Amino acid sequence: MALALARESDGEVLALTAVRAPEAAELEGEVDDALRDADGPLTKAISWGKQEAKRVGVKCAFRKQIGHAAELLTRLADENKHDLLVLGRRGRSPVKHWLIGSTTDRIVDHAPCAVLIVH
């Protein structure tokens, strides 16, 4: 969806992956390990994203950063003056959503720009 919108508006895409740090990460190596561990599942998705961006002719950068997704996305959107955040929705049960909330809800509540949620 982000690539299609960027193509229509002659825009660019930044695909951000937020990687949660280990709960008790005390050493710099543990944070590096968390980033490296995220590479496995992401490799296929990033490869697909690069191919799609090239196919549709959209400039797309890929970035991986340690932190909480809601905080990272809203801060980067504000700092870089992004026009739109495009989010996928995982969809939790109503009880789980009520108990722990939703990253998507937090982003919508704090985003400095428009948010599109793709379900």
Image (cartoon, rainbow, N blue to C red):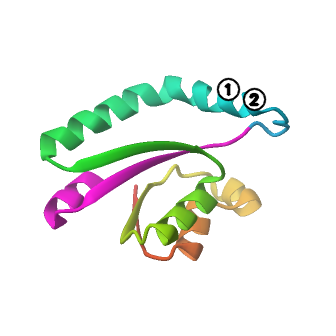
Q: Amino acid at mark 1?
A: Asp
Residue 9 image offset from top left, x and y in percent = 17, 67
How dense is the environment of label 2, judged by Cα within 10 Å: few (below 14), some, or many (20 and up)?
Answer: some
Decide: marks 1, 2 in contact (CB < 8 A)? Answer: yes
Query: Residue lying furthest front in this view?
Result: 28
Residue 90 image offset from top left, x and y in percent = 52, 49
Local secondary structure at mark 2:
helix
Observer-nearest residue: 61 or 91? 61
- Residues at marks 1 and 2, CA–CA distance in whole angstroms: 5 Å
Residue 33's disc is 1
Residue 36 visible, this angle: yes
Q: Amino acid at mark 2?
A: Glu
Left or right relative to 92: residue 80: left
**Residue in the picture at 46% in, 31% down:** 42
Left or right relative to 47: residue 32: right
**Residue in the picture at 42% in, 26% down:** 43
Residue indicated by mark 2: 30
The answer to whether 109 is drawn above or below residue 96 in the figure is below
Quarter of the image with the N terminus is bottom left
How dense is the environment of label 1, judged by Cα within 10 Å: few (below 14), some, or many (20 and up)?
Answer: few
**Residue in the picture at 20% in, 50% down:** 58
Observer-nearest residue: 1 or 6? 6
Say whether residue 14 is magenta: yes
Say whether residue 87 is magenta: no
Query: In which quadrant of the rendered view does residue 51 lie?
Result: top left
Residue 1 visible, this angle: no
Find the magenta span and give its range.
Answer: 1-21
The answer to whether 36 is drawn above or below residue 102 in the figure is above
